Image (cartoon, rainbow, N blue to C red):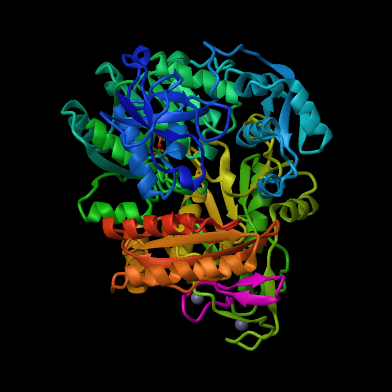
Amino acid sequence: MIAEVIINRSAKKLNRTFDYNVPKEFEELILIGSEVLVPFGKSKKLQEAYVVGFKESSNYEIKDIVNVKNNLSDKQIELAKWMAKRYFCNVSDCIKLMQAPGSKRKNESSRIHDKKINCVYLKIDDETLLFEIETGKIKSEKQKKVLKFIQDNPGCTIPEIEMFTGYTRGIVKTLEKNEYIEITQKKIDRDPLLHKEIEHTNKLKLTQEQNSAYNKVVEALENNKYEQFLLYGVTGSGKTEVYLQLIEKTLENNKTAVVLVPEISLTPQMLDRFIARFGKNSIAVLHSKLSIGERYDEWNKIASGRAKIVIGARSAIFAPTNNIGIIIIDEEHDSSYKSEMTPKYNAKEIAKKIAKQENIPLVLGSATPDINTYYKTQQKEITLLKLTKRANDSKLPTVKVIDLKQELAHGNRTMLSMELHSLIEENLKKKHQTILFLNRRGYSTFIMCRDCGHVVKCPNCDISLTYHKYQNKLKCHYCGHEENLVTICPECHSKKIRYFGTGTQKLEQEINKMFPNASTIRMDIDTVSKKNSHEEILNKFKDENIDILIGTQMVVKGHHFPNVTLVGVIAADSSLNIDDYRANERTFQILTQVAGRAGREKLEGKVIIQTYNPESFSIEHAKKQDYDLFYNTEILLRAQLKYPPFCDIIVIGFNSLHEEEIKKTSNFVYEYLQQRLNNENFKVFVPMPSPIEKIQNRYRWRIIVKGNMTKESNKAFNEVIKQVTDMNLKTTRISIDVNPNNMI
Ligand code: ADP
Ligand code: ZN
Ligand code: ZN
């Protein structure tokens, strides 16, 4: 018997099968998906590889497989192969996602609870690490392997490094001395659910709407039928209760359930509701904040069948479930379901593939569905289930939009409008809580006129231009249009053109000055870095009845604070003016979600949205909290401008140490695709430097392609990658991302 194997390495050249002989003693053991050790090339060290097929004879002179480890199922191998084609990566990259964390196996890793321990982090960034390896500054294979492990598992412990790489702490100490890594003391809790003592809740009597949604999914569940659903209901309409009861039904049928939630909303509040219903022993949790040891334990809990419910972020879709019966994706519009790292997969697409393989229902849930998802319900590809009322009869909050241009005209130059200011004052008196939201993430800045609200946009794309400091130019990230800095407003000729950019930190300062007696707490990337501190901030806000929570995106998702009656959006424009065709969608989603935080129970909620663009339709419709109105306007725009769902946007990225090489390669790819995709369906844009043109000595270029991805075009893209790989370029790399989250 001869096995076809794929070597477990990411080099593009190795994305093919190699033949090996299967010795007699392994014949019974070895299956498609087995992990094996094989001699490979000149290296004395054995290589890890995966079996992807068998055959009778081989044309090559072949060697023996040396060892066989655990197995993946045929279906998982099929999925990995499908992913590799679809996401333009190696099969082994995909198989890795389906393997237990770490490659050394022990029965159960030893548990450590509530102890201060040493956590290891990289001290250099990813690109620098790559640079140091490529230029030969880091030569030792052991060091490379340990660094790679730490890169994949930030915050891992030294015993974990020893256990999973097989190397001793000496190497870690050397790396620390050479300042590649740092070791810091942290308090960790090895069992993510250890401290949870939660009272059991019984299922609620479903409302009529909930019940009819529930029944439709149960029908698919009981008939072992693949069907995709969108559970679309306003915040507080009882979607989670429907999930809980669907899961209960699934367990009754002796099947298991996978629930995906956005990374950030995997909060204790959310988990508590599942634990309260099903008990913590039947639940496994998977997300990136867990240490590798914790992930390893949770993975085993699922594989052994002890956990019947998996709750996790994106990659939990690959959990080793037995007899899966339903997949639920909450907040399906969230961008975290799309991976921005290789493999650049979309968990919603993977879920669909698995649901089809297994003949089970897939339930997507949202109060503000992804435009693409909602479009599919209109096309009858997805079954629409609607919840139109709040389940506990609490009223939707009242929303008021405030025009900041008017504030300015009245001489108010602070970040708070007069109305928001006085509402906060009132709230402080009543001892009610307030949330202030300011979405200042990343570098995306925009140029705006403070007199008329005009934002400088690209003449070709209707997308705001981004200020490039380095060249002192304004650029369009889509078509490459560039122009000089604007100092006078092209609309109203005012000189009050401003580089817009104020952050949460500045807001907190201003609030502390304006309301010296109010207690405040801030939540953004800077304050949420330690493990659990996201949780700590939210608990503190709730338990200590802190007056004002100030935060970015993070405050938006799914939290439930009964005492919050006022929500203020400081500048709705910051998401409106990102250079992305999804700007309106993101704005509408964020505003609706923020508004959903106010008045969740008996107290009535008020929402103030401050903006320079009160007439923008995404803000107007968010004010009415009317998704359907928003959808109807947005889908027309998308059709007119030919953006998704009416086409795919494919970004081909290049990076290289050599400017000439990257230019030549990207031009070659451009010419090649021009020829291969020479039809009306596709438009290939000329190669251009990326918005961030250079990172750590590596040049970055890209080609944007607009069109509808088909089998044929997928093949063309896969072939161009192969062509580039065969050129054996020294430092130039190519990657392809279909409908990426952002275009930088
Ligand atoms: P969503 O997930 O849509 O935001 P939730 O499931 O969190 O909504 O429900 C909002 C509130 O309504 C929760 O406090 C929940 O306990 C309550 N609730 C949900 N369904 C019912 C029901 N059928 N009867 C009574 N209360 C319900
Ligand atoms: Zn102007
Ligand atoms: Zn443009």
The residue closer to the viewer here, 150 or 116, is: 150
Is 447 covered by the magenta stretch?
no
Describe residue 608's horizontal placement relative to residue 327 as left or right. right
Is 468 covered by the magenta stretch?
yes
Question: Where the N terminus falls, by quadrant?
Answer: top left
Q: Main secondary structure of the magenta part?
A: loop
Task: Please tell me in which quadrant of the rendered image residue 293 appears.
Answer: top right
How far across and down, in percent of the image, does residue 168 sit? Answer: 71, 20
The residue closer to the viewer here, 706 or 402, is: 706
Question: Where the C terminus falls, by quadrant?
Answer: bottom right
Describe residue 179's horizontal placement relative to residue 149 as left or right. right
The residue closer to the viewer here, 502 or 691, is: 691
**Does 92 appear above or below 677?**
above
How far across and down, in percent of the image, does residue 722 sit? Answer: 42, 55
Task: Please tell me in which quadrant of the rendered image residue 337 appears.
Answer: top left
How far across and down, in percent of the image, does residue 536 sit? Answer: 66, 31
Q: Residue at x 15, y 28 (%)?
A: 223
Q: Which residues are magenta?
A: 453-476
